[in-house]
Structure formats: structure tokens, C-alpha cells
Amino acid sequence: MKLFSTLLLIINLSLFADEKLGGQEIIERLDRTLAINDGLTRARLSIKRGNHETHFWKVNIFKQGEDVLYTFEITHRKPVAKLLSIKRGQNLTYYNVLSGNFFGIEQMEKMERVLHSSFTYLDLSNLSYEANYSAAEVNKTKTETSETSILKMTPLSTPSYKYLELQVDNTDYAPRKIDFTSQEGFLIKTMKFRYGKIKVRESNSNSEISSLNRLEMTDNATGLVSILEFTEIDKDTKPDKIIYEMKTMFEK
């Protein structure tokens, strides 16, 4: 009887550990995967429309702590737009450099699209999923080539989607995709994670690391595909705190 109780305790602890790893810890892993490095990250945003027309923007992402500044440029030109996120999206400001117009992004406006892409302001706000979503349930799936888990995530704050479904690899819990469901219950878009090499500049030397290097967001209603591809992490660039101030944002 004592042996049976000991075995039962071990089994229960094992299940608890698996459940914990399959829930909030997976969301924490998602945050770590999506984390933007302090300094400057260079990227490219491409938007492919149904008629095969593709638009490109050069993107510079300046990050310091919880604050992020995006600048969007047409190749070899000055920025055409800027997006400032303070305290992981608590305060968002968009500036159209060409028109000179700017606006603070209020709660529901965070769900609107950036530059008519499939990414919303909320998606690019450096949002902490761990702080804003809870793990509802985990379902494991298996195919001929892989084993994955589907984690349902329900929101703890607004604005938000009704729920998210995060697919992760069962081996290393690397995120593979997120399905976004609207408040009306419709699957509105899917974001896929791609991994590969990224250039890293640090201490005046160059190297490469294997990391998340591409996010592919597909709008299921329109078929619009937007790709944010990370090309280089420049740790030698140290953003000055002044670039996160409103008055500096309006400088061209």
C-alpha cells in the first residue's frame, strides 16, 4: 500500500509538471521567442496582395527595455511612418511622416492594421502574452512527420481577440503558428513562425545565430499575406532614451 501511494504521488507530480509546462510556461516560451533584442533590429516588411502585387518596407526596430520605436522606410529613402510603443503597448502613437499627421492609438484602435498589412498595432506593440493571456487547455496532435500541442489562450485584458490557439513543437516547445479568433468567433488570421540564421553585430564583429527570423501573417478573409523578416541584430547601436519621446518622434 505504501509503495502504491508513492507511485501514485510520483504520477500526480509528473502530470502536474506536464500541465504546467503545457500551459503558462509555453506562453512564457512564446514571449521569449518573440522578444526583440535591446538595440537595433533591422527587418523587412513585405505585403503580398491577391493580384500578386507586393509592397516592401525597410523596418528599423529600436528597443530599450519595454519601449520600442519602429521606423518604416521605402528602400533608400527617409522614414514614411513611425510607430512608438511605450511600456509594452500601454501607450501607442503612430506618425505619418509624409502627411505630418499623428495620433495616439486608443484601445480598440490597437486592432487596426499597420500600413494596410495583416499585422495590427497590437501585434507589433511588444505585447507580453504571458501577462495578457491565460492557458485554457492543451491538446496534443500527431502527424506522420511531427508531434505538436495546441494551446488555447484566453485574454485577461482588452482589447483582444476572443481567444488564440498556439501550436508548438512537442520536443522543444518552439512556437509554430498562432490562429487568431475574433470576438464574433471567426478565425480571422494565422501567424506562422519561421526559423533560420540572423546576422548579429556586437563589439564591432559580425556573426550569425539560429533564431526566429520570420513572421508570416495571413488574413483569412482577404488572403493578404504580410511577412516581417528579421535580417540583422545590431547590439552595438544603443538607442538614446530621447528617441522614445514624442518631440523626437516628429523629427524626419
Image (tube, rainbow, N blue to C red):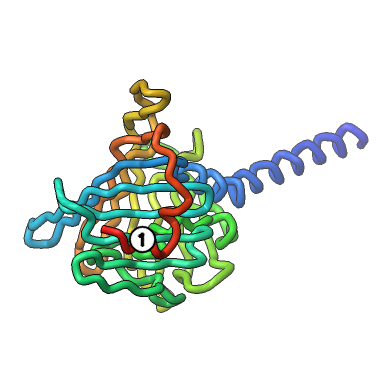
Indicate the quadrant containing the N terminus: top left, top right, bottom left or bottom right: top right
Specify the amino acid type for callout 1. Met
Task: Using the image, determine if residue 245 lies above or below residue 43.
Answer: below
Name the residue beneath numbered marker 1: 249
Can residue 64 be seen by looking at this rendering?
yes
Q: Position of residue 80 (x, y in %)?
A: 21, 60
Residue at position x 39%, y 47% in the image: 62
Look at the picture and state if 226 lies above or below 26: below
- Side (left or right) of 64 relative to 79: right
Q: In which image quadrant can residue 55 be found?
A: bottom left
Give the crowd class for mark 1: few <14, some 14-19, many >=20 residues within 10 Å: many
For the point 33% across and 32% down, which residue is it? 198
Which of 221/91 is in front? 91
Image coordinates of residue 138 in percent, x first then y, are: 55, 53
Query: Which image quarter holds the C terminus?
Result: bottom left
**Which residue: 34% across, 23% down?**
206
The residue at 43%/59% (across/down) is 125
Residue 220 % position (x, y): 26, 64
Q: Secondary structure at mark 1?
A: helix
Position in image of residue 71 (x %, y %): 30, 54
Q: Is residue 141 visible?
A: no
Above or below residue 204? Residue 49 is below
